[in-house]
């Protein structure tokens, strides 16, 4: 992007650079006169002339932006134009790349800003900057650097310096193009030589391959003659095999006819056997019907006998179970004398599981509450332990239809308990009595012969209820049952 702006050779200079260039500024009329005596370009009204600036080569333009971006942070804040104050805060590697449009526009529109930048750039350039200000440039100097300094300082003959730099840049570019073309020609010559060498090698390989193919062709012709001879021999053997096959087919047809006749006879015998089996099934069905009638009659007789016995003993349906009487009276009565062992007792090593015991008719499940909850839900509060256990026991009662009683230690009934699920009885021991004693009283209150299952890992509780004929089980059996539900 070329930098273009009105010529400002006659604008005031506020730094020593103008003095070294031989120009003196007049602050009253903003006109600069050349102290060397050479008249400047004038308009028909004897005013300063505006000349178009030359088109800058791209390397010169980039160098001007880079020099300006380098000195931009060193300027006082009040000397930095407002559009470039944000650019001055960029990182050095981003300032010239991202702020190039703003820097170029400001150099074009603000000659005073350019003069301030020129003063610092020339100070950094040293002897080269002084030579450019004097209108001369060392022959060994970089033409791009000389053109950039000349554009900023604007000494006498600065346009010629920029034109000379452009010619040098173009000559350098042309030299680079010529060098690239020479290099590409050399590379193509090298590749052509390499391709010729490769072609010679490939030709040798192809000649060797042709000789090998001719040799293989001779071998294939010999093999073809051998195959033709073998084929004639095979065709002769095939004709003999065809004759033998026709003979064997005749024999197979006769054997198949014999097999079909035997199969028809076997099917006739199978039909006779199925008929006999049908007669046998009908006889067995009649016999089973007679046995079913006898069994029904026996069960009907037993049922009528049970109804008659209940009527004879005047047994009315009961409203309460034995455990209900204990729940109503265990606070006032210390308990009856221990009953003797009954036939309900089982060995503690009995392999029957909780499900098998609960499957017994009219079973009663008694649970030592805190003994189970502290073993399975010890990390919870007591209220959460009771709630989780009672909810799980409600599911067991609903599934099995058995009577379920859970006993907790406590001097008085806890407040805030949720309603007990259907089929679950919740008891708390009263003051002066433990839950273990209450469990033993519940077991003693049950009639002899009723299956009572007590879940507790307390050895003393297990031994006590076993003496009264109950089935003691560990707390883990119930916890696994609840987890499975």
Image (spheres, helix red, strand yellow):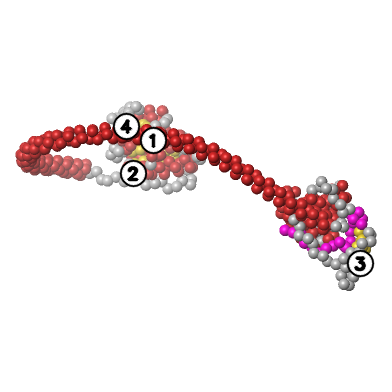
Q: Which residue is mark 1?
A: 213
Residue 441 in percent (x, y) is at 37, 34
Q: Nearer the viewer, residue 43 or 205?
A: 205
Give whichever of discs 2 and 3 has the lower sequence position: 3
Q: Which mark is residue 29?
A: 3
Is residue 392 rendered to the left or right of residue 260?
A: right
The answer for how far apart the CA atoms under marks 4 and 3 are is 121 Å
Q: Which residue is mark 2?
A: 399
Q: Secondary structure at mark 1?
A: helix
Mark 3 residue crowding within 10 angstroms, few (<14) / some (14–19) / many (20+): few
Task: Determine the secondary structure under disc 3.
Answer: loop
Task: Left or right? Give the position of 129 relative to 466.
Answer: right
Circle 2/circle 1 CB separation < 8 Å: no
Q: Is residue 54 something one can see in this rendering? A: yes
Dot 4 or dot 2: first in sequence order is: 4
Horizontal side of 363 relative to 420 (left or right) equals left
Q: Which residues are magenta?
A: 1-22
Our reading of the magenta stretch's main secondary structure is loop
Callout 4: SS: loop
- Answer few, some or many: residues within 10 Å of disc 1's Cα (few below 14, many 20 plus, some between 14 and 19): few
Residue 220: % across, % down: 32, 34
Which quarter of the figure has residue 473? top left
Give the residue drawn at x 94%, y 59%: 36
First reached walking from the N terminus: tag 1 or tag 3:
3
Residue 21 lies in magenta, yes or no? yes
Q: Report the residue marked by disc 4.
A: 352
């Amino acid at each position: 992007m070329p930098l273009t702006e009105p010529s400002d050779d006659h604008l005031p200079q506020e730094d020593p650079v103008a003095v070294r260039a031989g120009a003196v500024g007049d602050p009253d009329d903003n006109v600069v006169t050349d102290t060397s005596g050479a008249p400047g370009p004038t308009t028909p009204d004897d005013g300063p002339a505006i000349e178009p600036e030359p088109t800058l080569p791209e390397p010169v333009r980039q160098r001007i932006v880079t020099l300006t971006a380098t000195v931009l942070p060193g300027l006082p804040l009040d000397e930095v134009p407002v559009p470039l104050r944000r650019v001055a805060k960029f990182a050095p590697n981003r300032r010239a790349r991202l702020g190039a449009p703003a820097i170029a526009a400001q150099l074009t529109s603000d000659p005073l800003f350019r003069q301030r930048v020129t003063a610092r750039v020339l100070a950094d350039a040293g002897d080269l900057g002084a030579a450019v200000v004097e209108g001369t440039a060392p022959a060994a100097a970089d033409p791009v650097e000389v053109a950039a300094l000349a554009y900023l300082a604007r000494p006498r003959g600065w346009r010629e310096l920029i034109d000379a730099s452009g010619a040098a840049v173009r000559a350098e570019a042309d030299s680079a193009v010529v060098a690239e073309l020479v290099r590409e020609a050399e590379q193509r010559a090298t590749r052509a030589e390499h391709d010729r060498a490769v072609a010679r090698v490939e030709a040798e390989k192809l000649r060797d391959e042709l000789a090998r193919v001719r040799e293989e062709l001779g071998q294939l012709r010999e093999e073809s003659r051998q195959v033709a001879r073998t084929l004639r021999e095979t065709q002769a053997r095939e004709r003999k095999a065809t004759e033998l096959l026709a003979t064997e087919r005749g024999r197979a047809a006769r054997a198949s006819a014999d097999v079909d006749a035997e199969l028809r006879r076997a099917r006739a015998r199978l039909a006779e056997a199925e008929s006999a089996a049908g007669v046998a099934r009908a006889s067995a069905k009649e016999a089973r019907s007679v046995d079913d009638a006898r069994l029904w009659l026996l069960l009907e007789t037993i049922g009528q006998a049970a109804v008659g016995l209940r009527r004879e003993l005047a047994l009315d349906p009961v409203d309460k179970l034995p455990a209900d009487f204990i729940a109503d009276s265990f606070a006032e009565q210390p308990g009856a004398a221990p009953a003797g062992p009954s036939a309900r007792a089982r060995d503690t090593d009995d392999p029957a599981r909780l499900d098998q015991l609960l499957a017994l008719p009219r079973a009663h499940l008694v649970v030592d509450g805190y003994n189970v909850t502290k073993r399975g839900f010890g990390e919870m509060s007591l209220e959460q332990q009771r709630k989780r256990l009672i909810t799980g026991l409600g599911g067991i009662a609903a599934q099995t239809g058995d009577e379920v009683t859970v006993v907790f230690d406590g001097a008085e009934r806890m407040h805030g308990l949720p309603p007990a699920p259907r089929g679950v009885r919740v008891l708390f021991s009263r003051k002066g009595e433990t839950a273990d004693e209450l469990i033993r009283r519940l077991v003693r209150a049950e009639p002899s012969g009723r299956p009572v299952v007590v879940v507790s890992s307390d050895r003393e509780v297990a031994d006590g209820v076993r003496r009264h004929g109950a089935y003691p089980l560990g707390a883990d059996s119930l916890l696994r049952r609840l987890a499975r539900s």
